[in-house]
Structures are given as C-alpha cells and as structure tokens.
Image (cartoon, grey):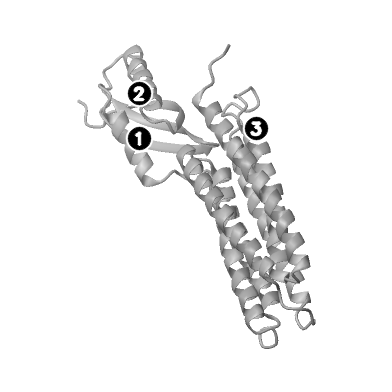
Amino acid sequence: MATMTGVEESYRTARRVARVGMAVSGLLACSNITIGVLAHSTSVVATGFEFAGDVLASSIVVIGMGVAARPADDDHPYGHGRFETLSAFAVGLILAITGLAISYQSLQGVGAQHPAPGMSAVAALVGAIVLRGIMSSVKFRVGRRIRSAALVADAWNDAVDILSALAALTAVGLAMYDPVRFAAADHFGGFVVGLIVVITGFRIMRDSSLELADTMPPPELTSELQAVARSVVGVDGIDKVLARKTGLHYHIDLHIEVDPTLTVAASHAIAGHVRATLKRELPWVADVLIHIEPSPGAP
C-alpha cells in the first residue's frame, strides 16, 4: 500500500475540517431560518440565509481541495494546487453576492408592521455565535498551519458570521426593548449583516487574486530560504529568488552563485544538494529549480 505524502495528508485534513463546517452550517441555516420566520425576525432569517450560502462555500472548498490533491501530470507539471486557490476566490465571490442579496432583501421590509422578535431569536443567534466561534478557530489554526488559502477563506467566512450574528443580536435586542421606537432596527440589522458579508467576500477575492497573480511569499519566508541555501557547502551567494504558490506549497526558482572554475558536474552536484536541503528543511517548499551563476568576486 502506498504511503500517503505530507501534501495528501494536509489536503485530507483540510477536507475533513471543511466537511464538518458544512454540517454545522447546514444545521445553523435550517434552525435560523425556521426560528427567524416563527419569531418574526428579519435579522435572524438573514443570518440563516448567510449560513445556507456557507454550505455552498464549504462544498466548493471540499471540491477544490480534492482536485488540488491530484499529483502533477503532463498538462499540470506544477500540480493542481491552483484549484485550491480558485476555490478560495469562488468562496469570496459567493459571499459578496450573498451579502448583496441579504442587504437588499432586508431593506425591503423597512416600514412593515409585524410583532417584535421573540426570545427564540436571541437563542438562535447566541447558539450561532458559539458554534461559529469554535469552527472559525479550528479552520484558522489548520488552514494557517498547512498554508491553505481556501480553508483560511472558509475560516474568515465563519468569523464574519460571528460579526453578522452580533449585529443581528443587537438589532433584535433593540426591537424587543422598544418595538415602537426601534421597529425598523431588525431590518437594518439584516442590512448590516449583508454589508459585512460583502466586505469579507471582496477581501477574500483580493487575497486569492494575489496568489493567482504569482505574488511573492512574505519576506520572512524568502529570507529563511536564502539562509538555508547559503548554508550548503559550495554556495558563495544568492543572486535571485523567484517563487509561486501552487496550493499549499511554493515552487522556487533559485539562482545560486558558485566558483566559476568548478566543472559542470561539480556545480550540478552543489545544485542538487541545495535542492534536497531546501525540500528537507522547509516543509512549505514543493520543489526548487536551481540556476548556476558564477560568483562575481571569484578570480
């Protein structure tokens, strides 16, 4: 039986977490929509539809992770990791569209006469805050550990649900406190929920777009890579570092400087040692393409 690689195990962990998130979102969507309708709360119904959108978002994350876990082939020599980033972008797009729909629908009920929300609306929102707090914490921890843009996007999705639920809870509380004076508070609370979702969606799309545009990794990562490469015997210096993120890892183009009097075979051996060392010491490095340059200070 073939041994599972670290990348495959990371993707499997991410999919497992995302599936749990889907189940939680489905439960919250059903409970909040039902309770919101029965309790006459636009804010609670709005959060329920937001949770329903989260089910779709998490399902896209699971699908994207499944495709990204496929090994490299002739058509995808760098692997399928970009599908993971694309799924993160899709999550952001879904959030933005869902938020706009929630805001629009919430404002349609302003001025309508209906009973004040009941205590069940408060209970539904408090329960959502607790569950979302747990799920966002787990997703952030796992997503950042394995460097998954899609899972971190899903975590932000959960985190913004907490803010949305808090906004809805405030609106419900005002409507219950003084149904006459704050009759429209519940509707405006739904509008705020949608606005928060839109902002988060655009933030996720921006971050994933940066990865798709081959933005370089953070300076601390490139500094760490150069330090490890310089530690290899025979490397006189680093001329250039290029990197692109494909899924959970980076593919590196590294220009190293060596003694120009060395033979091609000796220079190739140093390059191989550098590549092996980087892949062994830095778990976020998928592969390295080494370019040999002559040391400028050599005689």
| CA–CA distance in space, label 3 to label 1 | 29 Å
Q: Residue at x 73, y 63 (%)?
A: 35
Callout 3: SS: helix
Q: Amino acid at mark 2?
A: Thr
Query: In the figure, residue 4 lies in which quadrant?
Result: top right
Callout 2: SS: helix
Q: Residue at x 51, y 38 (%)?
A: 245
Frontmost of labels 3 and 2 is: 3
Q: Residue at x 58, y 34 (%)?
A: 81
Compared with residue 114, is residue 58 higher up or lower down, i.e. above or below? above
Question: Which quadrant: the C terminus?
Answer: top left
Which residue position holds label 2?
Answer: 277
> Would you say 230 lies left or right of 163 here?
left
Total labels drawn: 3
Picture coordinates of residue 140 (x, y %)? 50, 47
Which residue position holds label 3?
Answer: 66
Compared with residue 79, is residue 154 higher up or lower down, i.e. above or below? below
Query: In the figure, residue 197 lies in which quadrant?
Result: bottom right
N-term-proximal mark, 1 vs 2: 1
Foreground pick, 75 / 263: 75
Which residue position holds label 1?
Answer: 225
Q: Residue at x 76, y 70 (%)?
A: 105
N-term-proximal mark, 3 vs 1: 3
